[in-house]
Every structure is written in structure tokens, then in C-alpha cells.
Amino acid sequence: MAEEPVAKRKRLDDAAALSEGVDANEVIRFRLLNTSSNGAELTEEASFGPDMAHQFFGDDELIHGHTAPSVDIWIDQRTYVGYLDFMSSSQQTGATDVRKAILANFPGGLADSKEQFSAKIAAAQQPSLESLGPTLSLKDFPDGSSLAVYQVNLSSAHESIKALHAHMQPLLLFFIDGANLIEPKEPEWDLLLAMRTKGDVVTVRGFCTVFNFFCYPDRVRMRVSQVLVLPPFQRQGIGRALLEAVYALADTHNALDVTYEDATDNVQSIREKLELERAAKCAWLREAAASCAQSSAAANGSAHGNGHAETDDDSGSIALSLAYTQRAQRDLRVSKQQVRKLWEALLCAQPEMQSGQGAARLQALVQARLVGSVTSTKRVAENKRIYDLGSGFIMTKCPASSRVGSSAGMPPALESEDASGQSAEEREAALAEAVDARMEELKRLAAFVQRTR
């Protein structure tokens, strides 16, 4: 294994480091290794730091009592077997136990020497592609490599796949706020793996886990729980490939819908564009949006009976009817709330809705949804929320530090801890701000819809 170049790390002088502590995010480096097909050669491909370390070193994310600490976590891309290399020039009594803090969240363990690391890689069994279950998507690249997404049930998977997931999932804690490790023994967990193949070398590029909730009498509701694509592999379409595979799986299983647990901004963005693309390709829904916009413009604000819309708000008869909403839920595998957001984007892509009365009606439709979202959201315990989805509910954790933005359909000010103490004027101003933000977002989504036609 080649010696790594000296990492560029932010350093405090020795006295400051001992008295103030060192930011763990500045001294931790992940080092990804390429392994030859026979495991005989290890070469470093990429290194990168974490986004957060509070689940390891507390809210302040500081390592105390060490002079010039360095933390290198080496990872083999074929098996995700890891090696923890921690060093410091000196340490005081009571200094942070770095190894203990990190290993506490790595139930699969980490090697403590390069020799042990090499031995563990040699002994580890990489999952064979044949053991990974059905291929949900496949993409070929000009360099001769390919990316495939496989699905396997975790509880019944081969031991090599269970070990792979055990090595991978602790990395979530460094990149996703509020991430938790799951118990793979529950039969409801599916694992989706994005695997890159080039020649005879297969490496893992990302993964996600999906929990299948039973929905009476014979359906499932799929919840995307863990999604991870490490920084060197981001912006290569891997996250999108994983989520596309989720919806392909949902279609195959006739799932009621696909929901998300504490989706990050990146996952939320991929989700919205993917669901919008599916909606834009749904012929009947696309035609309904065009017909509704044309009828609304022709009616000049009066009620019209085109069968696509209903008139229970001030949005000028452009809200999607209940029958059409339920049909869209079935065809797109999304919740009622998501259907309403997708409908807004499809309408905004129609020329009749981009100015004048059409734009005003669309804005009224958005405002009605945002007000409804706030009133249907109930706080049931500290850091917990229940979201009413019409056909059921989802309880989610909400860290105190989290902010819910317009992309999630909830006004930040109305979702803040002190929302109940706001004056009517403050709530009205917050709602107006959220509506304006959503209208700007709809312009971008409308352009996306037009490009997908």
C-alpha cells in the first residue's frame, strides 16, 4: 500500500490545540483505495473530509487534549473494510479517546494497523454480482465501465452482503445529520447497491436502504431511509440511479407510494426532479394540466366543468380533483401532498399560467396548499412531527438544528419552534415569503418540465 501524501489540514498552534480543542472535521480524512481483482495491490484513489462529526465527538465536534492530531480512515472500495490510523504528537490526561469515539459507531470494527488492514481485505469476501439479486438499472460509460443498481433483501442476504452494509452504514454519520444505523435482521429492509464494473474489478459507488411498511390489505408503502454516495462519486448520476431504482421497485411491487425519512437537500432535489419527470411523462396527467390551463384562461375566472379541477378554494378552479389526485397517487407512487406539488409544477409549465390571471390563480393554489400543510402538521413530542398524507401518516424526527425549506413545501418561519408565539402579522408575512419562494422555485421546475418533453 503506497504511503499517502501529507494531507493539508488546518492546524492550531500547540497551546491553542490543547486549551481549545481541534475541530474534528479538519483532522479527519477518508482515503479510498482501489484494490486489484486479486487483492494484491492497494492504491489511493481519493481523499476527502467529513461534513460533520457531532455523533462521534459531541455538539462542539472538538478533539481535546491532543497536539497535532490526525485521523485517517482508509477504506477498500470493494469490501468497505476500514483501517483507523490515529496519531498525535502528545496528549494530556483526560484527552479525548479518539479511537473509542469512532469505533463506538463502527460495529463491524476497523483495523488498527496496515498489516491487519491488508489481512482483513484479503480475508473479506466481496459479494458476487450473482448474489446481489435483480438488476434494477444499468448504464454503460465511454471508458468501458458500467454502473448497475442491484436490490437484495437484507435479512436473507448472503453474509458477504450483510458485512458490506455493516461496513458502509457508519459512514452515514459523517455526512447526514440525524442519521441512524439500522437493524438489518428485520425482513422489511431492502438494500440497493450501485456497483461500478470495469474489467474484472467491481467497486461500490453508493447505496440506499428501503423499509417496506405493510399497508392493509395487500400493499406496501416504501420509505427510503439511508442514501449515501461519497463525495468523490457525487455529481455522476449515482444518486439519481439509486432513486430511479427505488421507483422501479415500487412499480414492480405495486407499492402504495414512496416516502422519505429526513431527506437531505441533495436527495430532496433529486427526488423532486425524478418525480416531476415521471409526472411529465404521464400522458393523461400532462394533458389534464394543459386542458385545465386552457379552460381556466378561456373561462376568464368563472367556474368551468372540465372534470380535472375542483372549486373549493380561491385558486380559480385549477386545483386537481380528488379523483384525479387519487389516480396520480396510484400511477406515480407518491403521496397526496406530493401530487399537489407536482400539479403546481405541471400547471406552471403551461403558457397560460405564467402571467396575468393564470399566474395569480397558481399563486392562490400554492398559498392554499401551504396553509393546509401547516394546519395538518401536528407536534406530538419533542423533536417529532406527524405529517398527514391523506391515506395515512408518517412520523419523522426533526433535529432542533434542522431548517425546513421551500423545497420540502413548508415555510421555515411557520415551522420554527416559536411559531405558536408569532403574531398574526408575522405569520402572514412568513406565509407570503414562503409563497414567493415557491413561485420562484416553480419557474425553475417549469423550465425542467419543458426540457423533458
Image: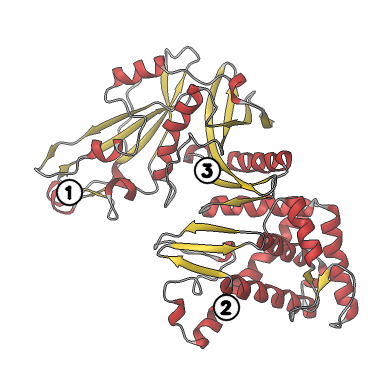
Chain-order first, disc 1 or disc 2: 1
The type of residue carrying mark 1 is Ala
| Up/down of 346 relative to 417, above or below | above
| Disc 1 to disc 2: CB gap under 8 Å | no
Residue drawn at the location 68% of the way across and 65% of the way down: 442
Residue furthest to the left: 93
Disc 2 element? helix
The x and y percentages for residue 421 are: 43, 82
Q: Position of residue 315 (x, y in %)?
A: 75, 78
Q: Earlier in the sequence, mark 2 or mark 3?
A: 3
Q: CA distance from mark 2 to mark 3?
A: 31 Å
Q: Position of residue 310 (x, y in %)?
A: 80, 73
Which residue, given by chain and number where applicable, does mark 3 sit on? 227
Q: Identify the image quadrant of the N terminus.
A: top left
The residue lying at 42 percent from left, 41 percent from top is: 181
> How packed is label 3: few (under 14 Cα within 10 Å), some, or many (20 or more)?
many
**Looking at the image, can residue 436 be seen?**
no
In 3D space, how far apart are the residues under numbered discs 1 and 2 (Cα atoms)?
46 Å
Residue 17's disc number: 1
Q: Nearer the viewer, mark 1 or mark 2?
A: 2
| Residue neighbourhood size for the residue with mark 1, other residues' Cα within 10 Å, grouped as few (<14), some (14–19), many (≥20) | many
Which mark sits nearer the N-terminus, 3 or 1?
1
Vertical relation: 157 (above or below) 101? above
Per the image, the residue denoted by label 2 is: 431
Number of the front mark, 3 or 1: 3
